[in-house]
Amino acid sequence: MFYVRVLVTGSTGYLGSALLLRLKDTEYKVKITSRNRPQDWQQFEWIYSDLVSGEGLEEAVKDVDVIIHAATSPMKNVKKVEIEGLRNLLSKIQHIQHFIYPSIVGIEEIPWKYYQLKLEAEELLSKSTVPYTIARATQFHGFVENLLLSKPLFNRYVIPGRWKVQSVDVHEFATHLIDLVNNGPKGRVEDYGGPEIMTIREMAEVKINAKKEKKTVFDVSLPGRLSKAFIDGKNTNINNQKGEVTFEQFLRNK
């Protein structure tokens, strides 16, 4: 029997970890690669690799049919990982049948360096000879909570309250990416968004109620094009509400 051989890069990351959890229940032959060994990896073949230096990449991509490229670095060495790392990887995978690239909704509209580099990476991939699918998602529930709602100041959530978010469950998006494996390369597919669009203030109030916290919300108005883009909801797509797990359900299930 022939089994599709799938490689997951960035297997220790937020999305990578969700992918491993979902891939346990499939019949794919799975390899995983990262700089650090995941805690729960025994079911899969793990290969050390470094996208930037290129070390270990040839071994990682050997005998693989499909790659889900979950490796990313929003805060550190961003260009080296997102662009140089992707270029290194693409140079070694001419045999790949399908390269799945998770990306982010609205990156052409939002002037944040990480998003701009994700857009550059999409363009780099589209100009390569590697068969690919680009799957954009809105922000993950956990990303929004950790970035904006995890560290109250003096019992207050100090937040850009008017920013809009259509957050989505990372496990639902991981399942979506796995569903794309057998579909073959499709170029860019429809965006994958969460079930509702909320302001950050509304999300803070949901968290206070869900966790029965004795906290308040303090709105701050941030100047500039970046803030305006989030206020205008450029990171959302009202026409693509595919996820079902709401932010409140995410909080209650933690």
Image: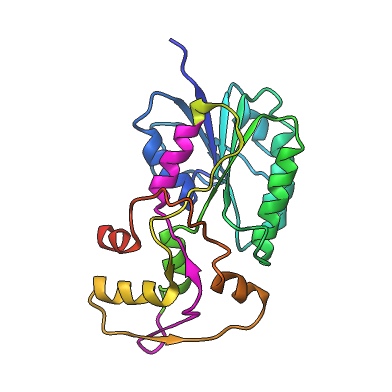
User: Residue 51 lies in what quarter of the image?
Assistant: top right
The x and y percentages for residue 186 are: 60, 32
Image point (71%, 26%), residue name: 94
Q: Is residue 41 left or right of residue 69?
A: left
Q: Position of residue 64 (x, y in %)?
A: 58, 24
* Image point (43%, 64%), residue name: 197
Q: Position of residue 85 (x, y in %)?
A: 70, 45
Q: Residue at x 31, y 72 (%)?
A: 206
How many numbered discs, if any?
0
Where residue 121 appears, as percent x and y from the top left, is 70, 48
Residue 206 visible in the displayed image:
yes
In front of the other: 17 or 168: 168
**Residue 157 belongs to the span the image colors magenta:** yes
Name the residue furthest bottom.
154
In the rendered image, the quadrant that contains the C terminus is: bottom left
Q: Is residue 249 above or below residue 72?
A: below
Q: Quadrant of the N terminus?
A: top left
- State the scheme by which the image is colored: rainbow
Residue 77 visible: no
* Residue stretch in magenta: 152-180
Q: Is 57 inside the magenta-drawn segment?
A: no
Between 208 and 43, the one lying in front of the other is: 208
